[in-house]
Image (spheres, helix red, strand yellow):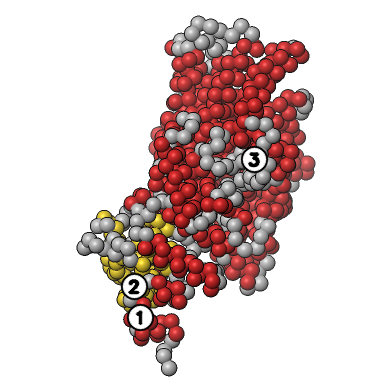
């Protein structure tokens, strides 16, 4: 996609990277929980947890669709695989969170690679349609393989997160665990995006024929990007399973893939901070505008449409105030690999 | 007995296949002219069904009148869709951007967005449950043909499809509008140079393609008795699969593959529980994309 | 100098549904040679380059690099064997910095996997990539602009950026696709000197050009294509006097 953010020259970020990182950590781990505890309500923690899960989903989709330029319309399918793997491993085999979550990620990632291998040589539009088909195949399987997945009834009573015997005793503690996982995932994703590997993906996105003439193994890069994004989708699924304690196939339909895609598009394709903000917006706004519930998908569709039309570079590609934020966080995440590696 | 049941299924499948074919033709036309995937095509089908239904519940006219009205509604919807989701992205006049990747991906997303909004709006207005259809209009009256039992719906779908395909041939090959469509499909820039109004040709393509889709929608709605806001999603994808299998640029190819798809789906319900039949279309899609990049029949369009 | 040529083109033919774009062309490029490839438009020069790069496969014939057949090899493997190239229509990434653009070349050959990206600090791979990039930038005198956006460079400078990126792949054979297109006389002269400099430093160069004076002035040897077939293959002086060449470019001599 050529909807890349244009880095601005000049001004260095106002605060040194370490301080920015510290600030973010403070906000995520102290300010948010404190505020929510003050306002009161496990309900708010529920929303916050969902926001974190969607941050992982949007950021991982951004790696493959934004940075590598592979439009994927089946992301929710891998989210679903992760959720069901975690659910089945914990309910049927009693395996703990520390095993089910990595397993969910690894299995989702592996299936992603298997799916990507034959389809990766397709030109982008056809690859997008293939991912649509795959996402739907996963959904149909989850819905109909009742022996394994209990079909439309879903899986109930998924045990909560346990870490070596310790269980969260409050919504806040659960939030903390999810937040930690999210931050760790974001760290990995940002290191991948803001690195020479990320540059390679961008080269593939912009002109893959030229990239291969420069020696880049385009197919391999695409498969790695796709597999990685599916891995994190699986992780997000496991988090969903263990925090909501109930999953069903209709949470992983095509509509959800579009939902996640909208977050990435609105925030700016290729921009990791953009994906985070897009996720926050599209999770929190519908909640904030309660009673708009029915209009949610309409709003999402409209937002996506107008974003493409008016802001092809997404929120973080245009507004300069947000541009400042973007640069700030962008610097915080890179570690000065060569002069200004990567996009901002 | 099993044999006859299989034949019944095949006939059923052919009817469904014909419907997919009508939609697939719409896809192929639009793809041929703009090299873009119209994600909202399934919704045109759905709108056609609802429009027909509203007419039926309002004044219960003869079926032919319903079809004509639906054709008109389809054309308008198609043109409206084109103006909304496709035209704004055709900002430049050079060949490179007329068929550029960025434009295709932008229109894919924009038509996707429109399709979502359309589905949701219809759900809000009509509710997500199946609509009630007056008994007289349900195309399910059985007709015996020897040992076989088909419905009047099968005959009507067959007849309507033949008529529309014929009309399409006539349109494409014997009218100026058709000529302009074929010219733009061949070379948008070249067509401009010889004075063809590309914009109008594109609108015409959308109109024609959507007319076919809309009629498919009302026919299926009456045949199966199911009209819901979500009804366009799966057939849309299946029509797309048929188009890809048929080689993207080939209308006859798309028709044959649509029939193949319909029959395969129908036969599958023999052996698997009903929920799995969608899997047939998706498997065909993946298999075609991976193993038959040229499609089964096509010469293979430029897929770059 | 060792015996076998670095690049051998052996009876190479490419047909496109009835059009013969490249017609049984045989030639070679020796190590440290500067070979020019000329011909009227439609002569098959671009197709020949794309065949060498591996973007398309030959219908008949063979291409060998250092003895090894390139037919069937994917483009990135051919690049890693040591064939670097530029593109006529300057395929640089305008929204990335000059440094990052050139580093793409280094990336391809050094390789940079996802795992390496996860480990903080400068690992062996990154250091090497930075080295190669800086080196290439030095060669084209763009080091001062390393942090600039590629979009901000002048046209002439962008040509050198494209060349730098190819140099960063550490090629043994560098294929230049119309590097002088759009340059004025002074710039072309500068380019000529630059290319000669590359060859002096040990590179082998195959050059496609329309600018006759450039080709004739710096090339050791000139290959002439017309309608897909080779019509001349000799030193510049001989080629300039060749009646077949003059015929194809100028029509019949009068």
Query: Element at badge 2?
Result: strand
Residue, x 57% and y 19% (percent of image)?
A180
Q: Nearer the viewer, residue B210 or A24?
A: A24
Using the image, name the chain to which the residue with label 3 belongs. Answer: A
**Disc 1/disc 3 C-alpha distance (Å):** 57 Å
Q: Is residue A138 visible?
A: no
Using the image, name the chain to which the residue with label 1 belongs. Answer: C
Q: Position of residue A40 (x, y in %)?
A: 74, 12
User: Are discs 2 and 3 both within one chain?
Assistant: no
Residue, x 68% and y 49% (percent of image)?
B85
**Disc 2/disc 3 C-alpha distance (Å):** 51 Å
Above or below for B231 versus A45 = below
With A151 as the anchor, is B45 left or right in this view? right
User: Are discs 1 and 2 both within one chain?
Assistant: yes
Residue, x 55% and y 37% (percent of image)?
A336
Quadrant of the drawing holding the C terminus of chain A: top right
Please identify, in this view, whether the residue under mark 2 or under mark 3 is nearer the observer. Answer: 2
User: Are discs 1 and 3 both within one chain?
Assistant: no
**Can you identify the residue that label 2 sits on?**
C221
Q: Decide: few, some or many residues near mark 1? Use Cα within 10 Å; few <14, some 14-19, many ≥20.
A: few
Q: Position of residue B246 (x, y in %)?
A: 47, 52
**Can you identify the residue that label 1 sits on?**
C237
Q: Nearer the viewer, residue C96 or A201?
A: C96
Query: Element at badge 1?
Result: helix
Q: Is residue C81 visible?
A: yes
Q: Position of residue C179 (x, y in %)?
A: 48, 65
Dots 1, 3 in contact, CB < 8 A: no
Query: Element at badge 3?
Result: loop
Q: Nearer the viewer, residue B60 or C31?
A: C31
Above or below for B285 versus A89 = below
**Disc 1/disc 2 C-alpha distance (Å):** 9 Å
**Can you identify the residue that label 3 sits on?**
A268
């Amino acid at each position: 996609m050529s909807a890349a953010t244009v880095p601005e020259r000049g001004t260095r970020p106002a605060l040194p990277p370490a301080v920015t990182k510290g600030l973010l950590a403070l906000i995520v781990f102290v300010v948010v929980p404190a505020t929510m505890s003050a306002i009161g309500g496990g309900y708010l923690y529920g929303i916050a947890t969902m926001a974190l899960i969607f941050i992982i989903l949007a950021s991982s989709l951004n790696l493959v669709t934004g940075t590598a330029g592979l439009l994927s319309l089946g992301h929710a399918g891998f989210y679903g695989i992760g959720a069901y793997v975690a659910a089945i491993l914990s309910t049927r085999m009693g395996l703990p969170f520390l095993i089910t979550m990595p397993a969910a990620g690894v299995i989702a990632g592996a299936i992603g690679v298997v799916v990507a291998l034959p389809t990766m040589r397709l030109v982008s539009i056809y690859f997008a349609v293939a991912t649509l088909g795959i996402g739907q195949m996963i959904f149909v399987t989850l819905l109909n393989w009742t022996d394994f997945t209990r079909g439309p009834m879903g899986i109930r009573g998924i045990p909560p997160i346990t870490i070596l015997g310790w269980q969260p005793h409050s919504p806040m503690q659960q939030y903390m665990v999810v937040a930690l996982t999210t931050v760790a995932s974001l760290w990995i994703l940002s290191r991948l995006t803001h690195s020479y590997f990320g540059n390679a993906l961008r080269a593939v996105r912009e002109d893959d024929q030229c990239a291969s003439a420069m020696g880049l193994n385009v197919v391999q890069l695409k498969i790695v990007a796709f597999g990685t994004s599916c891995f994190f989708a699986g992780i997000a699924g496991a988090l969903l399973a263990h925090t909501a304690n109930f999953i069903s196939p209709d949470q992983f339909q095509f509509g959800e893939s579009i939902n996640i895609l909208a977050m990435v598009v609105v925030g700016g394709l290729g921009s990791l901070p953009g994906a985070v903000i897009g996720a926050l917006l599209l999770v929190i706004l519908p909640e904030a505008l309660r009673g708009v519930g029915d209009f949610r998908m309409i709003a999402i569709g409209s937002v996506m449409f107008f974003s493409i039309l008016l802001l092809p570079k997404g929120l973080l590609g245009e507004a300069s105030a947000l541009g400042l934020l973007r640069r700030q966080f962008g610097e915080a995440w890179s570690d000065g690999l060569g002069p200004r590696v990567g996009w901002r | 007995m099993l044999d006859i049941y299989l034949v019944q299924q095949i006939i059923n499948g052919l009817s469904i296949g014909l419907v997919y074919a009508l939609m697939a033709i719409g896809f192929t036309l639009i793809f041929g002219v703009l090299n873009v995937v119209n994600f909202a095509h399934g919704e045109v089908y759905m709108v056609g069904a609802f429009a027909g239904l509203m007419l039926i519940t309002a004044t219960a006219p003869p079926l032919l009148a319903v079809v004509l009205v639906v054709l008109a509604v389809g054309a308008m919807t198609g043109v409206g869709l084109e103006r909304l989701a496709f035209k704004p992205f055709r900002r430049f006049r050079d060949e490179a951007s007329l068929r550029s990747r960025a434009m295709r991906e932008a229109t894919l997303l924009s038509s996707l967005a429109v399709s979502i909004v359309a589905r949701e709006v219809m759900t809000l207005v009509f509710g997500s449950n199946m609509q009630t259809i007056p008994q007289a209009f349900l195309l399910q009256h059985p007709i015996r043909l020897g040992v076989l039992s088909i419905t009047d719906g099968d005959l009507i779908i067959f007849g309507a499809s033949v008529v529309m395909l014929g009309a399409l041939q006539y349109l494409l090959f014997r009218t100026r509008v058709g000529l302009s469509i074929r010219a733009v499909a061949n070379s948008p820039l070249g067509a401009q140079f010889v004075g063809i109004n590309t914009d109008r040709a594109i609108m015409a393509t959308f109109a024609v393609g959507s007319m076919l889709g809309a009629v498919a929608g009302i026919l299926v709605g009456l045949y199966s008795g199911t009209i819901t806001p979500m009804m366009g999603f799966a057939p849309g994808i299946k029509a797309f699969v048929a188009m890809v299998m048929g080689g993207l640029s080939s209308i006859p190819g798309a028709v044959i593959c649509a029939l193949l798809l319909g029959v395969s789906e129908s036969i599958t319900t023999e052996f698997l529980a009903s929920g799995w039949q969608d899997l047939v279309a998706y498997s065909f899609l993946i298999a075609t994309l991976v193993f038959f990049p040229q499609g089964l029949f096509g010469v293979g369009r430029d897929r770059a | 100098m060792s015996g076998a040529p670095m690049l051998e083109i052996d009876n190479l033919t490419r047909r496109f549904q009835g059009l013969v774009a490249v017609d049984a062309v045989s030639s070679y490029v020796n190590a440290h040679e500067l070979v020019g490839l000329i011909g009227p438009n439609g002569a098959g020069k671009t197709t020949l380059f794309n065949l060498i790069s591996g973007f398309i496969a030959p219908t008949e014939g063979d291409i060998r690099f250092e003895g090894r057949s390139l037919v069937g090899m994917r483009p990135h493997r051919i690049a890693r064997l040591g064939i670097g190239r530029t593109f006529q229509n300057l395929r640089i990434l305008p929204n990335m910095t000059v440094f990052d653009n050139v580093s793409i070349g280094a990336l391809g050959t050094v390789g940079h996997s996802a795992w390496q990206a996860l480990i903080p600090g400068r690992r062996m791979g990154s250091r090497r990539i930075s080295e190669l990039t800086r080196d290439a930038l030095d060669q084209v005198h763009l080091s001062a602009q390393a942090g600039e956006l590629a979009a901000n460079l002048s046209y002439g400078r962008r040509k050198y950026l494209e060349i730098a990126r190819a140099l960063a792949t550490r090629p043994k054979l560098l294929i230049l696709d119309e590097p002088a297109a759009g340059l004025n006389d002074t710039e072309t002269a500068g380019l000529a000197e630059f290319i000669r400099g590359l060859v002096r430093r040990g590179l082998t160069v195959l050059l496609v050009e329309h600018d006759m004076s450039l080709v004739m002035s710096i090339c050791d040897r000139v290959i002439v294509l017309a309608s897909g077939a080779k019509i001349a293959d000799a030193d510049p002086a001989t080629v300039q006097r060749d009646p077949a060449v003059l015929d194809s470019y100028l029509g019949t001599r009068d």
